[in-house]
Image (spheres, rainbow, N blue to C red):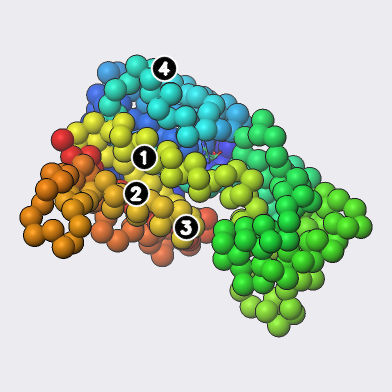
Amino acid sequence: MSEYEHQPVLLNETLHYLNIKPAGIYIDATVGGAGHAYRIAERLNERGLLIGIDQDQAAIKAAQQRLASVKPAVKLLRSNFEALPQIAADLKIKAADGILFDLGVSSHQLDELERGFSYKHEAPLDMRMDRSRPFSAAHLVNTASVEELTRIIGAYGEERWAKRIAIFIDRHRRDGEIKTTLELAEIIKEAIPAAARRSGPHPARRTFQALRIAVNNELEVLETALEAAISLLGGGGRIVVISFHSLEDRIVKNAFAKWAKGCQCPKEMPDCRCDHRPKLKVLTKKPIVPSADEIKLNSRARSSKLRSAEKLV
Ligand SMILES: C[S@@+](CC[C@H](N)C(=O)[O-])C[C@H]1O[C@@H](n2cnc3c(N)ncnc32)[C@H](O)[C@@H]1O
């Protein structure tokens, strides 16, 4: 495997649901090291087009190398997928045949220790996927109010000790800025009572996940981008979203449900007057999850959930 090591999650399931047309236009909105994208490209011919988007410059560089020899035309763009409508307009694309989102961070980003995603290694508290963004995790941890930190850690980390962690962070930052990953991990450990620390994952895992989601504004951009992606699909086009967090999965489920809804008249109305027709068919009533074998081979797959839908003509 290349230096940009990332095992694509739910790969066969992704390819199955994308149902690739060889001359189609496909967008990988989170191209990363092109693990999924390469396998999509393999199924496209010379008339096909693959567009890869990633907000991380290092990912775009890795994807360029991986996709150097494929048959279809490839366009790689360093951008937030929030800009999908603008990207499609710039490339004069009116309708896509398939769009993939494989959310979250890549193994490569986690392994690049100096980027501060890992609570196990000493590094500046950064956590920005796009390093041109103005605010890092250090900024958030040192400036957000206790209430805001409690909300972020509680909601995005699903951490029951959120308030205690926020109070401990506040206490520590009064003595000087919290600058590094291990400094923060120690504070979190201190905040969680010993009995609770003995079971479950590393005590800092949930808080680090929460801060990463907040720093990169991950949930808000997902909502906007899903709307844009579904709008951009042509009739019969497929969307596949792989998420790693229950809040992300809920956003995907709700976005699909909204587009798949038919009549929107109030329940009391005996007949439909709105004439609203479903624009999307949900292909996965329940999310697809990885097999035990995949989880054994790739622990990052553990919390993944795949949902897919097809745009109606
Ligand atoms: C899980 S990795 C994708 C891995 C890829 N599917 C592969 O197989 O190599 C997620 C990637 O999405 C990128 N990313 C996350 N949120 C993004 C956003 N809002 N806009 C653009 N890229 C984003 C990250 O930088 C990361 O490289």
Give the amino acid at mark 4: Asp
Residue 176, x across and y down, in percent: 90, 53
Please determine whether, in this image, residue 169 is positioned above or below residue 234.
Answer: below
Per the image, label 2 sits on a secondary structure element best described as: helix
For the point 57% across and 44% down, the residue is 217
> Is any atom of residue 281 visible in this view?
no
For label 4, the residue is 90
Please give the label number shown on residue 227: 1
The furthest residue to the bottom: 195
Q: Amino acid at mark 3?
A: Leu
Instruction: Assess whether mark 2 and mark 1 are in contact (beta carbons under 8 angstroms).
Output: yes
Q: Return the residue at label 2.
A: 255
Q: Dividing the picture into quarters, in which one does residue 226 lie? A: top left
Decide if residue 78 is in sight here: yes
Q: Earlier in the sequence, mark 4 or mark 3?
A: 4
Residue 15 percent location from the top left of the image: 31, 42
Query: What residue would you read off at disc 3?
Result: 247
Q: From mark 4 to mark 3, how far is it between C-alphas?
A: 31 Å
Specify the amino acid type for callout 2.
Answer: Ala
